[in-house]
Image (tube, rainbow, N blue to C red):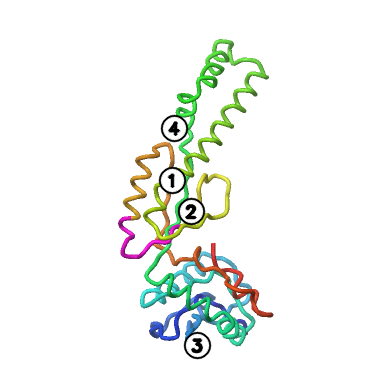
Amino acid sequence: MSTYVYGIVAGSHPALPDGLKGVGDPPRPVRLLPAGDLAAVVGEAPEGLRPKRRDLIAHQTVLAEAGSTGCVLPMRFGSVAPDDDTVTGVLTERADHYRERLRALDGRVEYNVKASHDEEAVLHRVLSANPEIRALTEANRRAGGGSHEDKLRLGQMVADAVRTLEAESAAELRRILEPAAEAVSAGPESTGWLANLSFLVPRDAAGKFLDTVEQARGALPHVEVRVNGPLPPYSFVDPGPARPAGAEVVGAETGE
């Protein structure tokens, strides 16, 4: 039976709560799988696992329970190994790396910050800051909308100005928030977001970080800022050295 891996902890990590269950229907029991001075939080991997809401929540719940009593290196949803021996083999192979990550991330949480533009506010800002765009807009208005070529030219000018403003807004958001965190990781670009950033924050400094987010909102009124957290520090758990044969799935889902 395949082994589902939730995360990695120190071998001295306290026992998990009695009856803790994770993914699957019915939910599978969760246990600690020791490997030297490390251990993996694991369970039986159900067949045909898909990212359904119930199982995503179960995965997060297990990590929250494990993280409530000590540092845990979280694995992404769907991290599955062929068997327990593969998991312990990976932990043994990468022991130095995982020990270093456990020390570095102890007492830290992640906040993911995504930002997008308020379209109306951005258009107002673009028009007020660009005399050429204002002039062409007014000329087109007086001409009953302007020629096809003028409309295309105006549209391209506005699009270019918005892209420039997006880059400037993303850089300014990061500049404001970065000093309030210990580390920052840029997430993959996606349509609709001008910034997708994850911040590593000491748990006892979370309030200060959230206050800084509010400062950023005040400084960037044309930007909509969304915060998700505190989260396990997914974006700051890297795979480490090359994986031993047969362990690709175990290490493939760490990080952001």
Badge 2 element: strand
Check contact, mark 3 vs mark 1: CB within 8 A. Answer: no
Q: Mark 4 is on which residue type?
A: Ala
* Magenta span: 199-208
Q: Is residue 255 magenta?
A: no
Check contact, mark 4 vs mark 3: CB within 8 A. Answer: no
Q: Residue at x 67, y 19 (%)?
A: 148
Q: CA distance from mark 2 to mark 3?
A: 34 Å
Which residue is tagged 1? 173
Q: CA distance from mark 1 to mark 4?
A: 17 Å
Which residue is tagged 2? 197
Which of the two discs, 4 and 2, sits closer to the camera? 2
Badge 3 element: strand
Q: Mark 1 is on which residue type?
A: Leu
Determine whether, in the image, residue 146 is placed left or right of residue 215: right
Check contact, mark 2 vs mark 1: CB within 8 A. Answer: yes
Quadrant holding the C terminus? bottom right
Reading the chain from its start, which is encountered first: label 2 or label 3? 3
The picture places residue 243, in percent across and down from the top left corner, at: 64, 76
Residues packed near mark 3 inside 10 Å, few (<14), some (14 to 19) or many (20 plus):
some
Reading the chain from its start, which is encountered first: label 4 or label 3? 3
Badge 1 element: helix
Reading the chain from its start, which is encountered first: label 1 or label 4? 4
The picture places residue 146, in percent across and down from the top left corner, at: 61, 15
Reading the chain from its start, which is encountered first: label 2 or label 1? 1
Which of the two discs, 1 and 4, sits closer to the camera? 1
Q: Mark 3 is on which residue type?
A: Pro
Residues packed near mark 2 inside 10 Å, few (<14), some (14 to 19) or many (20 plus):
many
The picture places residue 112, in percent across and down from the top left corner, at: 45, 56
